[in-house]
Image (spheres, rainbow, N blue to C red):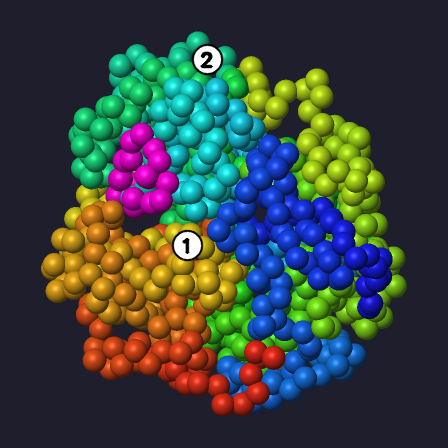
Amino acid sequence: MATTPLPLAHTHSVHSACPHDCPDTCAVTTTVEHGRAVAFDAVQEHPITRGWLCAKVRPYLDRVYHPDRLTTPLRRAGAKGEDRWEPVSWDDALDEIASRWQRIIDTSGAAAILPYSYSGTLGLVQNFVSSARLWNRVGACGLDRTICDAAASVAVPATVGAKHGLDPRDFLHSKLVVLWGHNPASTSPHIMPILRDAQRAGATVVLIDPRRTLTAKSVDWHIAPEPGTDAALALGVIHILFRDDLHEEDWLDQHSTGWQELRERAMAFDPTRVSRITGLAVEDIERLARLWASATPAVVKIADGVQRNQHGGQIVRAIVSIPAVTGQYGIRGGGMFYSQSGWISYDAEALGHASECPTVPRTVNMNRLGAALNGEVSDPPIKSLYVFAANPATSNPNAPRVIQGLLREDLFTVVHEQFMTDTARYADIVLPATSQLEHIDLHKPYGHHHLQYNARAIEPLGECRSNWDVMRALAERLGYTDPWLFQEPEEVIDDVLTATAASNSLLEGITLDRLQRDGTVPYAFGDSSNIPFEGGVFPTADERIQLRCDTMLHHGVDPLPDYTGPESPDEDVADGSLRLLSGAAHHFVNSSMANQDKLERKEGRQSIELNRTDADRLGIADGDLVTAFNGNGRCLFYAVVTDGVNPGVAVAPKGRWGHRSIDGRNVNQLTTDDLADLGGGSSFHGTRVFVEPATDTDSVSAQSSDHGLSVVSRENTTNASVTPSTTMSSKSAPSSAEARSGKSV
């Protein structure tokens, strides 16, 4: 399906938006000369972007015009994973996909087709609508998109009623900002200058993180508890607040449910016990509680890393209870900041038209993709996988199992991508995708209160097509005639905005025309307040914060926040293993940008940080090549010996592509696909590994590494071998699940 040609002009500029998985959602202007983008500049007037872009996105044109961009459809010409391809026409590719799917539907049912997408773009059209409409119409298998924020996305609304965050500029009113398990210098960088302004205005900024991150360099105090003990620390703070009569009892009486039960629960978390659990000094726990009690307004800002373990939901519930005990909710600059996504939830019916389609037959948890492809889902088994805006072979936990599933000869895999990713290398058909500059979209941030329109700046390179264009073409091939499967992007945006505005006044006056004209449009708060939960009124059933939340019983979780982990770090280390943290890399967004040479060089070698105590015990020196391993797999890293992580902890940032890594593997060869306590969330940071010096054979492999293709043995997906490509190579990623199920997003 061809796109409408852009008007010819020698030089012009258009409104753009950063599409990537970052709360900042930067506003950009793209300048085009003679049909080629020549500048990608931050909008100076945008209140969050403020005229600068992060290290990841600043060189975005290098990505758009990268010599490795896929520009023609490809069909596999060898064994899966061999990187042998033959070009095919779009007509042939689409015909093959449609005919294969029709056979699967006829023999096994549409539940055997699994669409897999996530946050390669966060656009309304190219992500949310593309992840819903066609698949609803087909009646395909659903996907629980739970890899990132699922535990908090249950815990936060259950506790406070909605994911409402304060305007980031309101940090300037805060006297205390606590960043808990959050590294905004790398993952939300436009918060950092606002925090520095807040410090100059008298605020104290505290970071609670097991690792000394880049953010730690800018804060007033860094506290490093043992990983996964955050709920104990939060309950310890609450214990002190109640013990020393530092709580706001009148506020709790008027605005909370269950505070007396929370007080009783917290009494079990005296500072001595919490010190033993967290590894923090009693004096530091006492200091943190008193600092919280003495500063008004005080706000805690959490992100997604803190929830990515087996008890992530209870951790979040414990942390967000603290501002209630001190009466900090509902005032400017106070309370809790997690996500802004609840202010505007797109109308689900307008997104996915689920009421006109078959019921979603079943859902697969994306964290369990490897297990699902290898038999955990069997009635019927998954026969086809369609991947776009995602790179699961790189980004999913327990990557060996994912790759084992992708190697199935009876699995028909289609990947729609900009580059030949780790996942694309296991596909049967690879389709070339547009970049953000080559299609139209609308972006709703989860870090501030401004919609951002993205116009198409340039013609698609080669034969690239957008996600939505491919969905429309496949709908046509499958014989569907529903008009909402064939709308132009502008029509989609207009319809969804109109339907959503009917029930949400924050979209009053925000039209497609206005977005196209202004690019950036703030939410229409008007006479209503943008202070979350102003006056202590919460959008819960009883309009109170649910410190005791009985709906937790439906999830099999204690209605009160609790900590159920080890009583001492020593309980986990008797076998010599280390707790592995795989947080964000500074120069990549998940796995996006990890194939750009300049950014990869800036990020440095694939490394694992070890405390000096552990390095000495293991006979490892700084810069040594080491092997990390566990029951899932093994991976080579270069050791960074540091006092920036606690003893018993190892840190290996995520995002690197396996086939560009030392031995064809990345950190997700090691991570667990166990699920969190709420929402089916991920538990990456619950992984344990052993580390030892690499063998001589490993050293030779590392020295000769040329970013060649990792061909994974069908007999042993853990012990992958690295071989160079010898044939034609590829060189010449509102919850969508909610949209499909009929919920607003």
Sequence order check: which comes first, mark 1 or mark 2?
2
Amino acid on which the number 1 mark rests in the picture: Ala
Secondary structure type for disc 2 = helix
Is residue 730 in sight in this rendering?
yes
| Percent of width and height locating residue 307 | 42, 44
Image point (21%, 56%), residue name? 641
Residue 353 x/y as whole percent: 78, 51
Q: Horizontally, is 672 left or right of 69 in the view? A: left
Give the image location of residue 89, x and y in percent: 75, 81
Residue at 65 percent of width and 83 percent of height: 75
User: Relative to the observer, which residue lies in front, 657 or 354?
Assistant: 657
Q: Which residue is mark 2?
A: 251
Quarter of the figure that contains the N terminus: bottom right
Name the kind of residue labelled 2 in the image: Trp
Q: Identify the image quadrant of the C terminus.
A: top right
For image coordinates 29% across by 60% down, the residue present is 608
Is residue 717 in view from this perspective? no
Q: Which residue is mark 1?
A: 585
| Residue situated in front as seen by the camera: 538 or 192 | 192
View extreme (top): residue: 250
Q: From which residue to which does the magenta span run?
A: 211-231
Looking at the picture, tell me which residue is in the foreground, 36 or 119: 36
